Image (cartoon, rainbow, N blue to C red):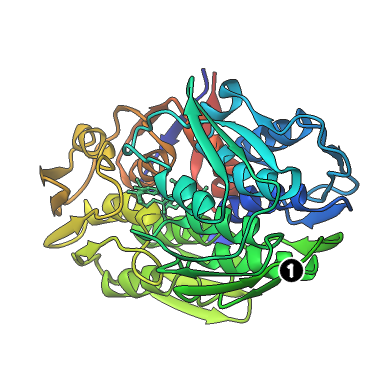
Amino acid sequence: MDKLVIEGGVPLNGEVAISGAKNAALPLLCASLLSAEPLTLTQVPQLNDVRTMEKLLTQMGVKRSSGVPGEVTLDAASIDWPLAPYELVKTMRASILALGPLVARCGEARVSLPGGCAIGLRPVDQHVKGLAAMGAEIDLENGYISARAKHLTGTQFVFDLVTVTGTENLMMAATLADGTTVLENAAREPEIVDLADCLNAMGARVAGAGSDRIVIEGVARLHGATHRIMPDRIETGTFLAAVAATGGDALLRGTRAGTLDAVVEKLREAGATIVTDGDTMRVSRTTPLTASGLRTTPFPGFPTDMQAQFMALATCAQGTSVITETIFENRMMHVQELVRLGASIEVEGNTAIVKGVTHLAGADVMATDLRASACLVIAGLIAQGKTTIGRIYHLDRGYEHIEQKLGALGARITRIN
Ligand code: EPZ
């Protein structure tokens, strides 16, 4: 099994290009199920989760073709098998995003219930409740969601809580429903706006994406389109935090300002200088890191997907940072690994109290989930001496060529197996 070995203590300098967003790519790939005409996506990140989603779609009968690197065309003219099997869903819970489009397009779907997850229980009750409100008949049996509807019907649906993929699933389903659907208390993440832009390019009528009230007027069918996937704001945030943590100076290319303001705000509070210019962001730090607490909330608040990376930075900040996780009930698994590197962190419930130390010291650590592994990479870059990170298959799910990109910024990082 692959591991990463990092010799820390080197400031990151230079330039890096940001990839397409994983959390935009996954629902966009599923949007191809909504039309009998081809959907072409560009800036598709080369990630394990993207490959899993493509496998899920092709086993349903979707034809996949790829011309230039980063470009994928999906042709769902015929969907022979509206099934998302447990074997695939257990490896990637985002497979649930096939449910809405399949019911809307094929009138039926059989999707494995995603099992448990390292960061929390993560039920999908809102996805199911919303589809039932649109008239789908739903059975949960033998670990599968079976949904049928001759035609979905537009309705007013209020989410009990803010859910990103729940909003995406119902928004996609509503594009082919009879009548108008209004989604209230919807998630506002930029990936939802990117999906709505693509759906509208396919002939859908989605309004209000990015706000907590989304209105979708159903249409009879959608046509083909070409859509460029937005830049990955979490990858952007991860690199901003890595450069700020090591005290470097770097230019990030292909970013999108306005999609991670809360992260930029917190990094500035911690002592980083961040200058945005068009689709570039320059980050540097010359003054000591200072403690800065945070609380994760849905967009536009501080994203839970940046909590762990920011905690790595806080381990060597002057003062105490109080970090509270409100989205997932078990997203502090990286804490004990940081303590192995010499960090001083106490956890009370979903709050971590991080007392800054003068330095971290390299050690063997283990990744437990995608963002925890990014946190350990940043901690390894800060630490004196050698850090070895195990189970980096978590990292490969969401970061494209991370050691090459960090290597280009001067990091001493190698992958061994
Ligand atoms: C999306 O997950 C992202 N994944 C996650 O990124 C991200 O952490 C999360 O949104 C929050 O921003 C993708 O977009 C593929 P939620 P999602 O539904 O949609 C509860 C990463 O690191 N909930 O917004 O699954 C749920 O348990 C990943 O890239 C219900 O109770 O998250 C959680 O506590 C990790 N019932 C909260 O809502 C439901 O039906 C928010 O979850 C749905 C969710």
Please give the name of the residue rendered at 25% of the width and 37% of the height, measured from the top-left corner: 361
**In the figure, is residue 222 to the left or right of 84?**
right
Q: Badge 1: how crowded within 10 Å, few (<14), some, or many (20+)?
A: many
**In the figure, is residue 179 to the left or right of 71?**
left
Query: From the Cβ of disc 1, is ligand 1 less than 8 Å away?
Result: no
Depth order, front residue of 80/293? 80
- In the rendered view, would you say 412 is above or below 315? above
Q: How many marks?
A: 1
SS at circle 1: loop
**In the figure, is residue 20 to the left or right of 346?**
right
Depth order, front residue of 408/207? 207
Query: Residue 261 in the image: x percent, y percent?
Result: 42, 75
| Residue 4 showing in the rendered view | yes
Query: Residue 279 in the image: x percent, y percent?
Result: 63, 75
Please give the name of the residue rendered at 38% of the width and 33% of the height, measured from the top-left corner: 117
The residue under label 1 is 204
Please give the name of the residue rendered at 44% of the width and 73% of the height, measured from the top-left corner: 212
Residue 415, image quadrant: top right
Please give the name of the residue rendered at 69% of the width and 35% of the height, measured from the top-left corner: 51
Q: What amino acid type is highlighted by mark number 1?
A: Ala
Query: Residue 121 in the image: x percent, y percent?
Result: 32, 37
Depth order, front residue of 67/382? 67
Instruction: State which quarter of the image contains the C terminus.
Output: top right
| Residue 357 showing in the rendered view | no
Query: Residue 391 in the image: x percent, y percent?
Result: 44, 25
